[in-house]
Image (cartoon, helix red, strand yellow):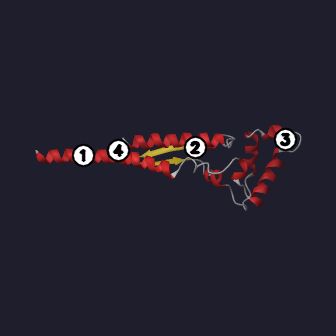
Amino acid sequence: MSSKILSKEFELLKDDLIKAYDAKGMRASGKFADSLEVRVNGLTAQLWGESYAQKLETGRRPGAFQPISAIEQWIKDKGIANRIQGEISISSLAFLIARKIEQRGWKREEYGGVELISEVVTDVRIQKIIDEVGVEQAMIYSTEIINLTKELAI
């Protein structure tokens, strides 16, 4: 039963994370939202997603030249390609974006705010889940102890 509670609560976390992702205007291809997956095994639950999720939360430090092909795809997914048609090529714009990220990094707060994950996955919310599972487990254990005590009394 506790795994059902964990599964339900982590699915709610996932849904709220996708809502926040959309509310912040972060959706391009939708790959991030589509990749989110809840994994529950007994009393362990995890929410998995794309490896770049931390960058959506905190941004990126300068120093690494980003893959041009990924930025080109982002330009297309965001609909920017239609707006720049005839002014600059997609590959040129992607190169300029990659160079800017390499030189200055990418500060998420300049593009709709930070804390995509931390505004949804809060300490209070995690404690609520722990409390719900803890109460459930305590009831299971107390029932088992009562049943064992009754068996021993017979």
Q: Is residue 115 left or right of residue 3?
A: right
**Three-letter amino acid code of the residue under disc 1:** Glu
For image coordinates 73% across by 53% down, the residue present is 67
Residue at the bottom extreme, as displayed? 63
Asked which quadrant contains residue 78, the reply is top right
Query: Who comes first in sequence, dot 2 or dot 4?
Result: 2
Q: Which residue was labeled with disc 4? A: 136
Q: Secondary structure at mark 3?
A: helix
- Residue 141, relative to residue 99: is it above or below? above
Q: Residues within 10 Å of mark 1 (few under 14, many from 20)?
A: few
Binning the other alpha carbons within 10 Å of mark 2 as few (below 14), some (14 to 19) or many (20 upward) gives: many
Give the residue type at disc 2. Answer: Leu
What's under tag 4, amino acid-wise?
Glu
Assign a secondary structure to mark 2: helix
Q: Which residue is mark 1?
A: 144
- Name the residue carrying label 3: 84
